[in-house]
Amino acid sequence: MPHLKDTTIEVKWVLNPGSQGYVQADYDVLVIPPSKEAVYLESGLIGYTAPTDSTQGEARLSYVLDQVGLYTFRLSTGDSANFDTYSTHHVFAVAPSNPTAKTTYETSIPAPPPLLGYSGNSYDVSAEMNGAPADPSHAVLSTDGTKMFVSDNNASIFEYALTNAFDISSATYTGRTVQLLGQINTSQHTKIAFNPTGTLLFVQDQQDKNIYRYTLTTPWDVTTYVYSGNFANFSLQFGTNGLLAFALNSTGTRLYLLHVYSAYTIYQVDLATPWDLTSGTVAASWSYAGTLTDGAFGFAIAPNNTNFYLGDNIAKNIKEFLMSASGAISTSAYLNQFQSFADEVIATSGISVCADNSIILVGTATPGILYQYVTRLQLNNY
């Protein structure tokens, strides 16, 4: 059950034995109200009893949950308040209540509802992909949910029409396909994105660490693409490693890049001119180390520009994270929310979030099959 509004809680963090040397730590509090825009409420330093070689230490914070929503309390014992590798997060759901109710709880109160669940919708694109190496890598929907675009591992993009909006099981191949080899030098992990009006297409080149922008003279028709030289290269950030995935926010002012495998890093690129890759500046980075078993193999941002998801192929699940309302990657926190996809696939090569907040996952162990999931944001389920 969620906490009741205006409940006073006592949040307790426990430090493992052997972590001597710390006497205080950074903490902050943020909440997602029903509007889904994250709000930072408080931050500062908190003292705690230092652990020894054999005993735990702990820190306690008394707090009044005076808003309805999803609270996250974070504590960092590292050298900075990045709340990443050295952090501990507690998440509480808060529901409306009698404002005079006052009860003290420890952190054993159950967590919020699960991140998401398999909707039962799937679609097999193997007839168009023709098998390896042309297996699907990424799938995205148009803003109105009536078209689906699937990229493969051979720099091709296939177009599908959906009879029922946002239901991938209702897809039909339109016969429209474009092949970008020659411009795109990679033969694997081709990721794509569109602007909300479907007039701009963005394609990643994993090998050369480039992202290209194409203009579609007919919105949402990939066969009408025109390249005008708009691209950005990120070799400085990625070195010899591949650019595994990217995402743009809904206003075209922020570009996020996922570093491949063990680098455990997401880069934030600020675009001075919306949707113009040549105007970008790498502004920040954030490490997700400690939250995934290995490097992420999928990355997608929700339409609210604050929630995002990473695919963990070792743990076989999708994990949910949250940024502040500004979309600054350095403010990211793991929400302790995840959903296993082990019943559907062994691994994923890509994930995307649709305009209705559902998630599409591309399976690698079942070549050619896409799976669709329902999220908490989609169900308004806090």
Image (tube, rainbow, N blue to C red):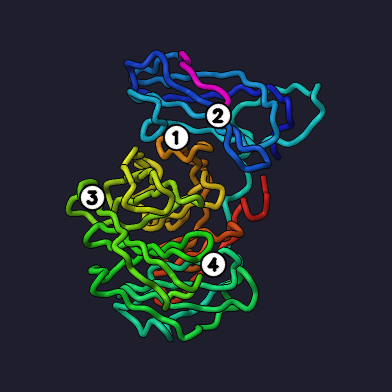
Tell me where residue 180 appears, x and y as whole percent: 31, 74
Predominant secondary structure, magenta span: strand
Task: Name the residue carrying label 1.
Answer: 331
Q: What residue did someone put label 3 on?
A: 238
Name the spot of residue 371 as percent of width and height, x first: 51, 69
Tell me which corner region of the image, top left, top right, bottom left or bottom right, holds residue 211.
Answer: bottom left
Is 249 rendered above or below residue 184?
above
Q: Position of residue 18 (x, y in %)?
A: 33, 23
Is tag 2's residue or tag 1's residue first in the polypeptide sequence?
A: 2
Q: Tell me the kind of residue under disc 4.
A: Ser
Give the CA distance from mark 1 to mark 3.
22 Å
User: Where's the C terminus, which quadrant?
Assistant: top right
Q: Dot 4 surroundings within 10 Å: few (below 14), some, or many (20 or more)?
A: many
For the residues labelled 2 and 1, say whether their Cβ atoms are less than 8 Å apart: yes
The residues bearing labels 1 and 4 have C-alpha atoms spaced at a distance of 29 Å
Secondary-structure class at tag 2: strand
What residue sits right under mark 2 in the picture?
Answer: 40
Judging from the image, what secondary structure is the residue with disc 1 in? helix
Q: Earlier in the sequence, mark 4 or mark 3?
A: 4
Task: Return the residue nearer the eye: 207 or 260.
Answer: 207
Report crowding for label 2: few under 14, some 14 to 19, many 20 or more residues within 10 A (C-alpha).
some
Task: Decide which of tag 4 and tag 2 comes sooner along the chain.
Answer: 2
Q: Which mark is residue 142?
A: 4
Q: Are the residues at dot 2 and dot 3 in contact (C-beta closer than 8 Å)?
A: no
Regarding residue 295, the answer to whether it shows in the image is no
When the figure is inspected, residue 61 is found, relative to residue 265, above or below; the finding is above
> Which segment is the magenta one?
41-47
Q: Amino acid at mark 2?
A: Tyr
Is the residue marked by circle 1 packed among few (<14), some (14-19), or many (20+) residues within 10 Å? some
